[in-house]
Every structure is written in structure tokens, then in C-alpha cells.
């Protein structure tokens, strides 16, 4: 018995010794941590960790006029999908047939599912938005279509000024641009001293032909929720597009890709990323230099920066597009807003999470895969002859990546930065009970919604 016990102790101690001595050490993790510490603006890699969605106090860039609360988030979450607000369509056939989410679909990472979003004036859904087409009763000029590829409404708490041109929002990069805020009645909202989300959402509800007032709130059942979300606003001012915009902005700030593998790795789960993805991350934050522009937790840049990469505009890519063309100021990016020659053809650096299943890239949707995007950066050759060479960003030059390095970088972008469960941010139903994100007859059939 004594001999058996001695043998057991010997085996146990040997096993423990071997497990300690031979515990696998992934040098890629050490290298990546060191590089992230070097690239972080704070000096520590935890700078890149996204907040938890319900930790409202940790959500940056909140509007002092609109602090995030649970009541606002829940109201905004329903209003964003509520087709019952679509009460001012161009033609009555599209009444209550579309919503904000028509162009920002959760299962497509809150993008439109196609190269150009269409709200009022479209039919159909397909599997996830790709089947949406123009209603034949509408002309191309009648539809509510976006002039550039729709930006996703994820990680927008790291946004200060909205849209590709940064046109909306009274502060940050728009400080000092007050002289151009009178260019149209929509941009004049910047005089209300609002952050980008609050300003843009109020504009969007108007542009996208949606109605919010006391009668609508009563009929759809939202009055009590507005009362809970905005108790400090007088009842006479409580039910309108501005308060609805505030609620939707609060909701937006909670839509975070904090379950992506890179986020899990940052929080200590080192097996969340594969070795290939870690190699891609080392390229992103190292040799490829992507972090020089994509350096915030959402991998956009703060304060916002605008660059020209010489890519094509939406109307130049061969797609059938509506309400945009060579004279559309949205095709001039920041310059279309400021009117300054040095800003022409320059567009905001976007966030980089959940691009895997988008299918269209750059403001003009001129690329159809992330590999094409990386290859475009690697070649460093502008594709749009209408963009003067002098406007091209000096950072846009050949990267010298090998084919294997391109593959590794694409793997990091596609899969390490992909949060697979964005549907968690969508409601099961809205108060109206209407189908969403669209409520036209064809969409209802394709979505299986009655």
C-alpha cells in the first residue's frame, strides 16, 4: 500500500511539473500585447476594449442634453424599427411600409444589405435586405435613397459627427464651421448645439418621411414610453422628432460589437483568436499601418479625420442608383459640406467592426469584399480619375504586403472583428405590431411576417 501511494505521488508530481514546464506559451499573444500597448493612445492595450452595452456611464461622447437612460434606450429600440412612423411617403401606397431599420438591418450588421439604401419607394427584402428594389410606381427621383453606401449604426458611441462628411453635430470637427450651417434647413440643426447622433437622427426622421407627434404616439401606444423617457421635458414639447431622435441616439450608443473575438482576446480569452488572426492583427497594428487612422476602440479615429483614397463614387460603379450623380455634393465628401477646396473628395475614416457580411465597401460601394479592400490599399493606386492627385492622402501608398500577409490581414478583419449576434439588439416586435424592418406586401411575404 505504501509503495502504491509513493508511486501515485511520483506520477502526480511529475504530471504537475510537466504541465508547468510545458504549458504552451503563445509568443504571438505577447507580441500583440506589446504592439497594442505601443499603438494605444493611452499606452495600454485595454484602450481598445469596447464598453458593455448596459454600462451607460462608460459610453463616451454622450450629449449633455441627452444622457443615456434605460427608458430612452428601450424607446429608441422600438422607434427605430417602427414602420408605423412612415406616414409621409411620396405616394400613399408606401404608407407605414418602411422604417429607419429598412437601411440598417441587424443581420447585415446594421447596413442596408445592398449598395444603396432605399426606404420610402421600395419593395421587398430578400433574405436580408439584398432583395429590396424600387417600387415601379415611383420614379428614381421620387425614392428616398441614400447618396452613398449607408454607414452601419454600430459602435456609434465613438462618433462625434455623423455621415461620411461629418456634416451633423455642433462640436468637435464642426467647431469653426458655423458659416456653412445655413446652407440648408437640415444642416441648420447644428445651431441647436447637439452631438452628431442627436442632430443627425432628427434630420433623418424628416428626410425619411417619418412622423412623430402626440396623436401618432397615442395611436401606436408610445405615449407612456415617451413620458418615462423624458419626464423633465414639458408635455407640450415631449412628443416630436427631436425627442424621438434623442431616444434613438441613446439606443445607438448601446449597439456595440463587444462580443467579437478580438474583444474577447483583449479581455483575456487568448484562445478567442486563431494564430492566423493574431498574425493579421500584428499586421494591422504594425507593418500595414492601419492603426495610424483606425486607432479608437471602434477602430475609427477620434477626433474624426477625412481622407481621399481616390475610390469611385456610387454612380460610377455600374450599379443602378437613384438620386445621385456628378453634381451631388455628397460625392465630394467633407468638401461638399464645408465648400473648402482642400476638403474635396475626402471622407470620414469609418469604424471597422462587422464588415464581414456587408458586401459593399468604401463610400461608393466600389469593392465587394474585404480582400478587394485590402488589395486596393496594398496596391496604393487610386481608381477614380476625377479625383485630383493632390487630394489623395499621403498615407495611401503601396504597403508591400505579401500574398500571405494579405490573407492574414483579411482574416483578422473578417472574423476577429465580427460579432455574430447583432440580432440581440433588435426587438421581437414593435408596439404597433406591424412587420419590420419593412411592411410592404412583398417584404411581408419574403420575411414570413403576417
Image (spheres, rainbow, N blue to C red):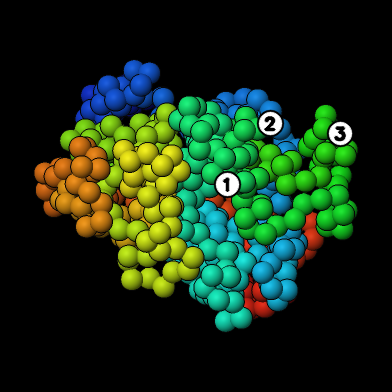
Q: Quadrant of the C terminus?
A: bottom right
Query: Which mark is on residue 66?
Result: 2
Number of the label disc, if any, that sits on residue 234: 3
Structural crowding at the residue carrying mark 3, measured as other residues with C-alpha within 10 Å and reported as few (<14), some (14–19) or many (≥20):
few
Q: What residue is at 34 percent from the left and 44 percent from the top?
A: 344
- 443 to 303, vertically: above or below: below
* Residue at mark 2 to residue at mark 3: CA–CA distance: 15 Å
Rendered location of residue 127, percent (x, y): 52, 71
Ranked by sequence position, the earlier of labels 2 and 3 is 2
In the picture, the quarter occupied by the N terminus is: top left
The quadrant in which residue 366 appears is: bottom left
- The mark lying in front, picked from 2 and 3, is 3
Please indicate whether residue 188 sits to the left or right of residue 111 in the image. right
Task: Judge from the rendering whether residue 199 lies leftward or rightward of residue 45; answer left or right.
Answer: right
Image coordinates of residue 29 in percent, x first then y, are 28, 31
Residue 184 has which mark? Answer: 1
Residue in the foreground of this view, choosing between 1 and 179: 179
Residue 83's disc is none
- Tell which of 112 and 58 is nearer to you: 112
Amino acid at each position: 500500500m505504501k509503495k502504491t501511494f509513493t508511486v501515485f505521488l511520483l506520477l502526480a508530481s511529475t504530471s504537475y511539473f510537466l504541465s508547468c514546464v510545458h504549458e504552451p506559451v503563445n509568443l504571438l499573444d505577447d507580441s500583440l500585447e506589446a504592439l497594442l500597448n505601443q499603438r494605444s493612445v493611452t499606452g495600454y492595450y485595454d484602450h481598445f476594449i469596447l464598453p458593455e452595452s448596459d454600462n451607460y456611464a462608460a459610453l463616451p461622447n454622450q450629449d449633455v442634453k441627452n444622457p443615456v437612460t434605460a427608458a430612452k434606450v428601450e424607446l429608441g429600440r422600438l422607434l427605430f424599427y417602427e414602420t408605423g412612423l412612415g406616414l409621409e411617403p411620396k405616394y400613399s401606397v408606401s404608407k407605414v411600409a418602411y422604417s429607419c431599420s429598412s437601411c440598417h438591418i441587424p443581420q447585415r450588421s446594421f447596413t442596408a444589405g445592398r449598395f444603396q439604401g432605399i426606404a420610402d419607394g421600395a419593395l421587398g427584402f430578400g433574405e436580408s435586405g439584398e432583395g429590396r428594389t424600387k417600387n415601379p410606381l415611383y420614379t428614381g427621383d421620387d425614392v428616398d435613397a441614400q447618396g452613398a453606401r449607408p454607414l452601419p449604426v454600430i459602435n456609434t458611441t465613438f462618433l462625434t459627427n455623423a455621415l461620411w462628411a461629418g456634416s451633423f453635430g455642433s462640436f468637435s470637427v464642426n467647431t469653426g464651421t458655423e458659416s456653412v450651417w445655413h446652407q440648408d434647413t437640415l444642416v441648420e440643426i447644428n445651431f441647436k448645439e447637439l452631438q452628431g447622433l442627436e442632430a443627425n437622427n432628427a434630420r433623418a426622421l424628416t428626410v425619411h418621411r417619418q412622423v412623430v407627434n402626440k396623436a401618432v404616439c397615442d395611436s401606436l401606444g408610445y405615449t407612456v414610453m415617451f413620458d418615462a423617457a423624458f419626464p423633465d421635458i414639458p408635455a407640450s414639447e415631449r412628443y416630436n422628432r427631436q425627442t424621438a431622435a434623442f431616444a434613438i441616439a441613446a439606443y445607438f450608443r448601446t449597439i456595440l460589437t463587444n462580443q467579437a473575438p478580438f474583444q474577447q482576446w483583449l479581455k483575456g480569452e487568448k484562445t478567442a483568436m486563431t494564430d492566423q488572426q493574431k498574425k493579421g492583427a500584428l499586421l494591422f497594428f504594425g507593418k500595414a499601418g492601419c492603426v495610424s487612422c483606425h486607432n479608437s476602440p471602434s477602430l475609427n479615429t477620434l477626433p474624426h479625420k477625412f481622407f481621399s483614397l481616390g475610390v469611385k463614387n456610387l454612380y460610377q460603379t455600374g450599379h443602378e442608383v437613384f438620386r445621385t450623380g456628378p453634381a451631388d455634393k455628397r460625392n465630394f465628401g467633407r468638401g461638399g459640406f464645408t465648400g473648402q477646396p482642400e476638403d474635396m473628395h475626402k471622407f470620414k475614416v469609418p469604424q471597422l467592426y462587422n464588415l464581414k457580411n456587408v458586401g459593399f465597401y468604401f463610400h461608393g460601394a466600389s469593392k465587394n469584399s474585404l480582400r478587394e479592400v485590402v488589395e486596393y490599399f496594398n496596391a496604393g493606386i487610386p481608381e477614380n480619375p476625377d479625383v485630383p492627385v493632390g487630394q489623395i492622402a499621403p498615407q495611401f501608398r503601396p504597403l508591400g504586403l505579401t500574398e500571405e500577409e494579405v490573407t492574414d490581414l483579411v482574416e483578422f478583419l473578417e472574423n476577429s472583428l465580427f460579432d455574430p449576434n447583432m440580432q440581440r439588439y433588435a426587438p421581437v416586435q414593435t408596439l404597433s405590431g406591424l412587420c419590420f424592418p419593412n411592411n410592404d406586401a412583398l417584404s411581408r411575404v419574403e420575411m414570413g411576417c403576417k
